[in-house]
Image: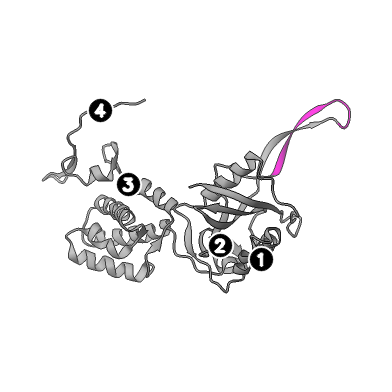
Amino acid sequence: MDIYLKQAILQVVDRELGDPIYSQQVLDLTNGNTRDYLTNKIKKLSSAQSKTGVLRQDAELASFLRDATADFIGASQRLVEKWYTVYQKSDDAPSADAFVVLYEQDAQAYLAFLKVDYHQAFTHYVNAEEGPLMNQLIIHQSILSNKTQKADEGFAINLQTFGFELMEKKYTFSGEKMTYLSTNVIESEPAPSLEENVKVVKKAAEKIGKKFEVAKHDVVANVKEAIYDTIETNGEIDTSQMAAKIFKDNVSAQSEFKAEMTENAPAAPAPISPAVREIAEKKYGKQKLKLSNGIELIVPIDVYQNPNLFEFINHPDGTMSVEIKNVEEVISRL
């Protein structure tokens, strides 16, 4: 995905100093390092842990977004002020830098909020103030993660549709661990992430599989297959379509799985962005198998599903064999 940065600003949120230090000028986006850093952080908002949703029109944040293009500095400060009003009440939320970025993607305008926590790191310091020059080793207390790592928290909101993608953490508020970004800042309930949906499906499938004495490796393999197929076909996780894929010809198991999903899964299919869809297809497009004799296999879904290429063979003594068929060449790599 191509991202074109329009404006960006950095606000310093060092909790040891008190209130944030608000910048009165935007970042210089002609600097290639700055552009690369922010672009990579924005891209990494799309992951299997990302939640999606639509911002409520009456949410306070919506008014900031409407002003973002005309008054970027003012709107970004009001956004960070709203966020920090909640964040500062946490007992354990760390110091961080907060970036607000206005950008375009696929001809659509977006606003991103990125929180990058501080980390300790060692560096050198050349002390030439008193006496002979001395090279010292010191700890820097406010180092940011590099550009290849995702932001610790953040969201991106489409300024036309108000659709958002969100990554959030739990912090301690009044002795209780909880999320705060969706509930108290965005104030709009997101759909569960791909990862959360997969956990619900896997847990339910294993529970039903155990009841109907379906081998665990078959259940897990079928879950991966079902996730891959429903994303490939519909572009989203739709748990209502998974029963037949996971439990094949076992109608009773399918019925109980559907009941379990009705109770525990979200009522509507969870939408996912194109970037997360690509991640999911890569992750669930291969079966990873570890056999009891130590052999490990990575098998593409289309090969796994084709009995002319790959097959499990059950033996009367309870053991099984794996047959890999019609192989034209074997390549060995160090």
Q: Secondary structure at mark 3?
A: loop
Secondary structure at numbered mark 4: loop
Q: Earlier in the sequence, mark 3 or mark 4?
A: 3
Are the residues flagged by discs 2 and 4 in contact, CB closer than 8 Å? Answer: no
Q: Which residue is mark 4?
A: 330
Residue 155 visible in the shown view? no
Mark sitting earlier along the chain (4/1): 1
* Residue 289 place in picture, x, y as percent: 29, 43
- Residue tagged 2: 159
Q: Residues within 10 Å of mark 3 (few under 14, many from 20)?
A: many
Amino acid type of disc 2? Answer: Leu
Q: Earlier in the sequence, mark 2 or mark 4?
A: 2
Q: Horizontal placement of 306 versus 24: left or right?
A: left
First in residue order: circle 1 vs circle 2 = 1
Quadrant assignment for the C terminus:
top left
Which amino acid does the dot numbered 4 rest on? Answer: Val
